[in-house]
Image (cartoon, helix red, strand yellow):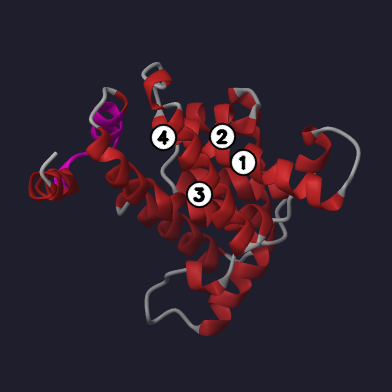
Amino acid sequence: MDPKKQGKGRRNTEHIDKDKVWERFVAGHDTYFKSVFDHYYTSMYGYGVKLCNRPELVKDCIQELFRNIWERREELDHIESPNVYLFVSLRRKILKKIKARRKTGGDLEELDERIFIQFGKEELIIRDEIRFQKKSELQQALNQLSNRQKEVIYLHYYNGMSYGEIEKILSINRQSVHNHMYRAMETLRTLLDTEIMKLVVTLLISFLLFL
């Protein structure tokens, strides 16, 4: 293929919905591979670092995952939700890498319980008039949630995942997703005063609006 035409094809993918980019890639349009990578990399990296806080390991897992995708591209046309497929695959790769490095026994479900998720202040993008103290209180409250509750909040509000998508990523049923979200919000209500709780609701909704 003419490099100029190939480059033009890549530029044309910039304004296409990421699911459409995936569909065209698995349909045999190899020039869309870079666009698939570009579209999904940031959210995958953010999620991966949340799971293990090891940036280099996460990058290695993402690179390995996309190599696998390239090699198996003709077998992926059955994937209904690329987002779910990529997050599930990345999650499994990270857990397997951690298990291998720790040389621990047990299965991945046991290791899954040891995932330690933390929210940082840089993620709490709050209006300028909100005092730094309020942001610190909110960060501390979020980090007192269970790891599963934090993961559900992160996937839903920070990545726009539906409850149906979250249940597939975490391999739990829909009711469990609802329960984790409900308990998380109840815990936040007990830890935060009314003013900050209103801020929490506004903040989380704003993440959904601007995804």
Of pointers 4 and 1, the one earlier in the residue sequence: 4
Q: CA distance from mark 4 to mark 3?
A: 11 Å
Q: CA distance from mark 4 to mark 1?
A: 19 Å
Q: Can the viewer see residue 129? A: yes
Of pointers 2 and 4, the one earlier in the residue sequence: 4
Q: Which mark is residue 70?
A: 4
Q: Amino acid at mark 3?
A: Gln
The residue where tag 3 is placed is 63
Q: Which mark is residue 91?
A: 1
Identified at 54% across, 61% down, the residue is 197
- Which tag is nearer the camera, tag 1 or tag 3? 3
Q: Amino acid at mark 1?
A: Arg
Q: Name the secondary structure under disc 1.
A: helix
Q: Amino acid at mark 4?
A: Trp
Of pointers 3 and 2, the one earlier in the residue sequence: 3
Identified at 68% across, 62% down, the residue is 143
Q: Which mark is residue 179?
A: none
Question: Alpha-carbon neighbours of circle 1 within 10 Å: few (<14), some, or many (≥20)?
Answer: many
The residue where tag 2 is placed is 88
Question: Position of 26 compared to 45: left or right?
Answer: left
User: Residue 33 at what x, y percent from top left?
Assistant: 31, 40
Work out whether residue 4 or residue 162 is closer to the camera in this orientation and state it: 4
